[in-house]
Image (cartoon, grey):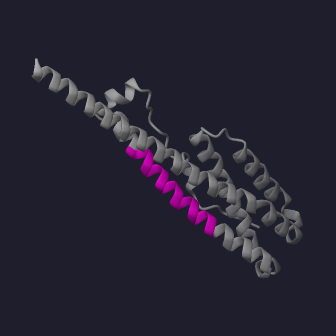
Amino acid sequence: MYVILAILALAAVYAVIVYNGLVKSKQMTEEAWSGIDVQLKRRADLIPNLIEIVKGYAKHESETLEKVVELRNRAQGVPAGDIEGRAAAEGLLGQALGRVMALAEAYPDLKANENFLELQRSLEGVEGEIQMSRRYYNGAARDLNVKVESFPSNLVARNFGFIKAGYFEIANDADRAVPTVKF
């Protein structure tokens, strides 16, 4: 009788420990996503200023600039919980921003403009922060996913509604390619 009670008590303690570990992993994943979201917002806030400066120098490049604005708005419009959708939209935006930065090579006056250079440095810094935040988020998502899928913690996860987190990654190989700009 005492043996059965001891086994049940140990199982209950184990279930609580696993549950708490799952909660911690879920919270770390949410906190990591918040970090990505903050960096993506910083990048989105820099884009209008960058576009305005480039417009003054590259008037006939309006199609490229309009595409960046459209992609920025599309990325900002992705629902908060759609990590895969946000990753795809941000990948396209990153490609378009690469084309805008390449425009500076064709316009020496733009390349020498102090405001443009400052925005370019800020954007490069934000891009680095996005990459670090993405790696942190994907690590937190991996840890949660391992707990959600591993036995016996998957039994607790299933009973309490814990689900796998999606990774923030570029889904399309074409989005990984370095953009080419031809004049």
Residue 173 x, y percent position in the rendering? 54, 50
The correct choice, above or below, for 15 with respect to 74 in the image is above
For residue 177, side relative to residue 61 (left or right) = left
- Majority secondary structure in the magenta region: helix
The answer to whether residue 95 of the structure is visible from this angle is yes
Query: Observer-nearest residue: 70 or 58?
Result: 70
Residue 102 x, y percent position in the rendering? 71, 69
Query: Observer-nearest residue: 19 or 95?
Result: 19
Quarter containing the N terminus: top left
Q: What residue sits 57% from the left and 41% below the top?
A: 84
- Say which quarter of the image contains residue 35: bottom right
Query: Observer-nearest residue: 38 or 49?
Result: 38
Q: What residue sits 83% from the left and 69% below the top?
A: 53
For residue 100, side relative to residue 95 (left or right) = right
137 falls in the magenta region: yes
Give the residue furthest to the front. Answer: 2
Quarter containing the C terminus: bottom right
Region rendered in magenta: 125-143
The correct choice, above or below, for 76 with respect to 152 in the image is below
Q: What residue sits 60% from the left and 38% below the top?
A: 82
Residue 7 x, y percent position in the rendering? 16, 25
39 falls in the magenta region: no
Residue 174 x, y percent position in the rendering? 58, 51
